[in-house]
């Protein structure tokens, strides 16, 4: 039987072809109908019986070796972004305004190839693998939806594993970090209510634009002056909307923003303080504020033992000099919820091979160096096999 490296290389053309097909037909959060259909069809062709429509558009399939052993949960996210594609490639998106600008097309193709590889080597393995294809990661809602819909009913996972292809890392580098590695992601909306009127008579109004301006600046102090410098947090106001004309003071202004944290206590404290500061600033200027908080996913926390095992696997696959400790990232990922169900590791595989694949994630020109795909298949497959021996 060929080695896992040889098997991953033999599947490379199929992995790339599937990635390109998915790239041409991107679907955003909870609209991944065609994508889920492609996944289910491939899984059925492998002899599995996938459950579809889990959490609306998620897919779960369990492969059982028939021999006692651990259960490994392997997850890939499947959704695209509402981003118009700007690059000119043969596999360019055919959906105006939508594209795979983060690599989830690659994640899906990789996990399907891993499933094919593992099933083809089934006589060597024991235990079970639960293949989880998750929608709506980009809005950090898909994992929660799948779990609420019974994605793990009857599945007692011992380990969890997943990967993210990355234009932040050179081709073939594996980046991994134990402990908190990606931030909790919360979002909020603050609607400042004033009293509108004529711009020439501001004394007769309560100007919500002035209140909102003070609020934007005041919220920055929650990190710079109230958070321990060795802790990490971000408060960003990313949207300000209000007003209709140059001579009208509006009735209200809407602010949208995000809070990113690693520590649970810091997360809870800053949420309270955002509300307190918003109410205090509004009261000072005779306005009111309506807060609307959306709790996102918690921090991605990699288990120390699982991370050490993955690091050892990666060093065997790509070499010790190509395995690095990833920096903590303020980006979030609801892989966090799967890792809460079973200890495991979420790692990055470098996919930046040149200028075309050097654009940042979520950029209209984002792309992957597809030479990363068989590397990712090999590392993930080897990682799962290693966990099945635990």
Image (cartoon, grey):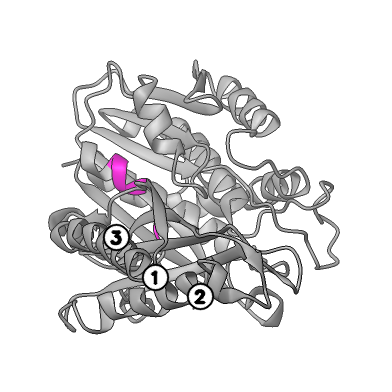
Q: Is residue 182 visible?
A: no
Q: Residues within 10 Å of mark 1 (few under 14, many from 20)?
A: some
Residue contact at pointers 1 and 2, CB within 8 angstroms: yes
337 magenta-colored: yes
Q: Which mark is residue 210?
A: 2
Q: Position of residue 167 (x, y in %)?
A: 55, 72
Q: Position of residue 253 (x, y in %)?
A: 55, 61
Marks 3, 2: nearer the viewer: 2
Taking the spot 78% from the left edge, 48% from the top edge, the residue there is 24
Q: Which mark is residue 313?
A: 3
Q: Which mark is residue 217?
A: none
When the figure is inspected, residue 233 is found, relative to residue 41, above or below; the finding is below
Mark positioned earlier in the residue sequence (3 or 1): 1
Q: What separation in Å lies between label 3 and label 2 (alpha carbons)?
A: 56 Å
Front position in the image: 183 or 134: 183
Secondary structure under badge 3?
helix
Please state, as top left, top right, bottom left or bottom right, where the C terminus lies in the image. Answer: top left
- Left or right of residue 56, residue 197 in this image: right
Bounds of the magenta segment: 332-338
Please state, as top left, top right, bottom left or bottom right, where the N terminus lies in the image. Answer: top left
Secondary structure under badge 1?
loop
Mark positioned earlier in the residue sequence (1 or 2): 2
Taking the spot 49% from the left edge, 15% from the top edge, the residue there is 49
Q: Circle 1 is placed at which residue position?
A: 285
Q: Residues within 10 Å of mark 3 (few under 14, many from 20)?
A: many
71 magenta-colored: no
When the figure is inspected, residue 231 is found, relative to residue 260, above or below; the finding is below
Q: What separation in Å lies between label 3 and label 1 (alpha carbons)?
A: 59 Å
């Amino acid at each position: 039987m060929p080695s896992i490296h040889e098997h991953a290389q033999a599947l490379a053309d199929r992995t790339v072809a599937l990635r390109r097909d998915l790239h041409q037909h991107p679907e955003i959060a909870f609209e991944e109908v065609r994508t889920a259909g492609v996944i289910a069809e491939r899984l059925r062709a492998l002899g599995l019986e996938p459950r579809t429509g889990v959490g609306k558009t998620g897919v779960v399939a369990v492969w059982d070796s028939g021999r006692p052993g651990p259960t490994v949960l392997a997850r890939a996210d499947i959704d695209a972004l509402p981003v118009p594609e700007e690059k000119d490639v043969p596999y360019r998106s055919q959906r105006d305004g939508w594209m795979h600008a983060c690599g989830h097309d690659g994640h899906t193709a990789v996990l399907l190839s891993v499933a094919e590889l593992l099933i083809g080597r089934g006589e060597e393995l024991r235990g079970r693998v639960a293949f989880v294809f998750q929608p709506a990661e980009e809005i950090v809602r898909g994992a929660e939806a799948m779990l609420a819909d019974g994605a793990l009913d009857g599945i007692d996972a011992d380990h969890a594993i997943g990967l993210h292809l990355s234009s932040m890392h050179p081709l073939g580098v594996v980046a991994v970090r134990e402990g908190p590695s990606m931030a909790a992601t919360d979002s909020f909306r603050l609607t400042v209510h004033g009293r509108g009127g004529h711009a020439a008579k501001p004394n007769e109004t309560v100007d919500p634009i002035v209140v909102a301006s003070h609020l934007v600046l005041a919220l920055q102090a929650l990190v710079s002056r109230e958070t321990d410098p060795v802790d990490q947090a971000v408060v960003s106001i990313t949207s300000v909307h209000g007003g209709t004309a140059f001579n009208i003071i509006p009735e209200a202004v809407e602010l949208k923003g995000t809070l990113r944290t690693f520590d649970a206590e810091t997360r809870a404290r800053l949420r309270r303080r955002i509300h307190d500061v918003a109410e205090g600033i509004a009261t000072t200027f005779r306005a009111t504020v309506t807060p609307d908080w959306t709790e996102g996913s918690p921090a991605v926390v990699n288990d120390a033992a699982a991370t050490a095992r993955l690091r050892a696997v990666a060093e065997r696959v790509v070499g010790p000099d190509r395995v690095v400790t990833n920096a903590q990232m303020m980006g979030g990922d609801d892989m966090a919820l799967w890792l809460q169900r079973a200890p495991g590791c979420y790692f990055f595989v470098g996919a930046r091979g040149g200028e075309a694949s050097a654009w940042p994630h979520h950029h209209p020109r984002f792309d992957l160096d597809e030479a990363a795909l068989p590397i990712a298949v090999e590392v993930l497959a080897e990682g799962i096999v290693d966990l099945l021996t635990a």
